[in-house]
Image (tube, grey):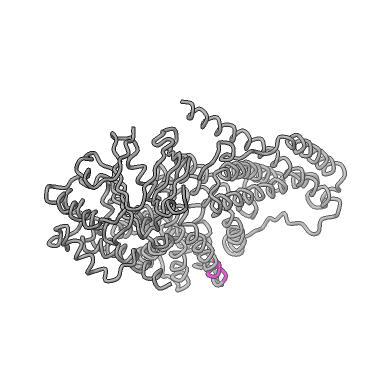
Amino acid sequence: MSTSLLSRHGRGPSPRFGPLFAAAALALLVGGFALAFYWAPEDADQGFSQKIFYLHVPIALTAYACFGWGAWKALRLLWTGERRYDLESYTAIHMGLIFGLLTLVTGSIWAKISWGQWWTWGERQLVLFLILFLFYSSYFMLRYSTDPGPRRERNSAVYALFGVVLIPVSFLAVRIAGTILHPTIFTHEGADLPWQMLVAFLVCLAGMLSLAATLYRVELTGKRIDASLRELRELLA
Amino acid sequence: MTEESRLTDVITARKLSKRFGDKRVLEGLDLVVPRGGFVLVTGPNGSGKTTLLRLCAGLFTPTDGELEVEAPRGAIGFLAHEPLVYNELTALENLDLYGRLYRLPERRERAGAMLERFGLWRARNERAGTFSRGMLQRLALCRTLLHDPDLLLLDEPFDGLDVDGAELLHTELAERSSVTALVATHDPEALAARSTARLALA
Amino acid sequence: MNAYAGDVAALARKDLLLEVRSRDTLPAMLLFVVSALTIFHFALPSGSSERAETGLLWIAIVFTALLGLTRAFAAEREGGVLDGLVLAPCDRSAIWLGKTIGLTVFLVLAELVALPAFALFFHPLSWDLVAAVALADIGIASIGTLLAAIAAASRARELLLPLLFLPLAIPVVIGGVGASIASDPGSFLGFLILYDGVFAILSWASFEYVITE
């Protein structure tokens, strides 16, 4: 398997599009929040506190997207054996974990505002994200405690695949747990959203995804440079 | 390289490198082992002899460079530093298990014959954990040669063998005149007569 | 196909034979689970519900299983045998399947002691609970074998295995406890079957990648 330095770590995201992503993220996020706070109607039941929905749910969905992207890259690693996918998978999951943590934080704030408690087991999304947070934190323990090399790459990739399978399985588990174990008293699943809310929400979602993509590219480039530098240093030493 | 010679080269390595984190064990190694070749690998401790053998066996993947081994897994006989046997199974049970995994017909008979050839027949029903160092090495050789491999990858085959054991090994190798072999050894003179080439690792 | 089944049978038989000879793992698991149940009695104030006790049983099962999992590849580590298995021409997934079958048997044997002990210490059990335990065993053994192989490559094997295992065990506990106490255990048992199916297939297919370098 003859590989050059660059191709091994990947050519990296094209620098031309970097500023584009960042600009799109900024525009969508600012626009989205403006729409959310000034244009979309207030929720009849929850009032102004419901606005955090425009932050919390896009962050949650973005986290799912990151985990899914990480799993896709992991699959590519196992399929092709090209080592650059390891960095891509790792970075995506790192993003996912950050957004997952933010989901828990915003969800907690929402719970405090809505029901006066910082945590509740009755909120399904929150519980699901706790499980995923634990899982992907273990992913990082796996990476830190294994020496770098093909073994770590493959183990991480397989574990990433387990994670993405765990998402629907846990979702189902928490759902059925709600029926008997911890009754889902509180739910944010509103009735049909008025279309203005939907539009604002979608813009916020697009903004979050762009933000994640921007951060992903930045971090990935940084990691690639790190890895290439390290190898150059070894070759010259 | 002509098409013909490519078919006859069992191991081909080009600029083969293996690194573990920051530690460079092999760097830019070129190696060709033709069919029927018997190559001795010499070098001080830590020079990468074991790593080279494990790369050829497929237990490690190269960090850089190319490595082609034209031998299916079932045709490779690998002798490691460890005997690769279960301590709580008897000699016969260990070989029977490997015989099963290597899909050998009449594996019980072959296992028995192998043990006999290496002077272990009397210990066949004793647990490998009770074996001495020399007996373990003989058992490991039984395991390595059980399936009549075409390619031998041997890491210090004479390690731990007494004079009798060494003689048995010589006899075995002499009988298998058509195998291709890559042998790491501290004592190249012992196999000098048989070897076709030497590779010295720094 | 036949060769594959033969490999799996040989490997599973080997694991059971090794345990019979060395008697390392199973006695420890039995003692552990009874000790755990004893501790649970003291951890539960009097007047605790049967439901709480059932929940604790599942904790005992998960942690006893974890104890067994840390020993999953112990015999292979002793003689460096894993290399020998990986070098053999058999499918690497056969190694997984053989090991998983062996682990499942260990778990079942441990529960043959644990469940009666629980019934003795706390309250009688339902057949739904027994079914849930059996299904949980399969799932735990499946992912456990794979995770044990992943953890084996790390510097802190004993620490990493529980961390990798516990988040994945959460759905098993949900399914198990639900099946044990719900008036309609069917959906929970169905969920456990789904869990087993999905994760067994994933473990079976991905074992090849974690066992080779």
Q: Is residue C189 magenta?
A: yes
Viewer-proximal residue among B2 and A3: B2
The residue lying at 21 percent from left, 58 percent from top is B175
Q: Residue at x 39, y 70 (%)?
A: C3
Q: Position of residue B144 (x, y in %)?
A: 27, 56
Q: Residue B25 location, x and y as percent?
A: 39, 36
Specify the quadrant of the image occupied by residue A26. top right
Q: Is residue A53 left or right of residue B2?
A: right
Please give the range of residues in magenta.
C187-191
Q: Residue at x 52, y 51 (%)?
A: A159
Relative to A88, C93 lies left or right: left
Left or right, A184 with respect to B5, comes to: right
Closer to us: B191 or A160: B191
Q: Is residue B197 above or below residue C124?
A: above
Assign the magenta stretch its main secondary structure. helix
- Give the x, y percent position of residue B143: 26, 57
Is there any visible trace of residue B33 in the rendered image? yes
Quadrant where the image shows the N terminus of chain C: bottom left
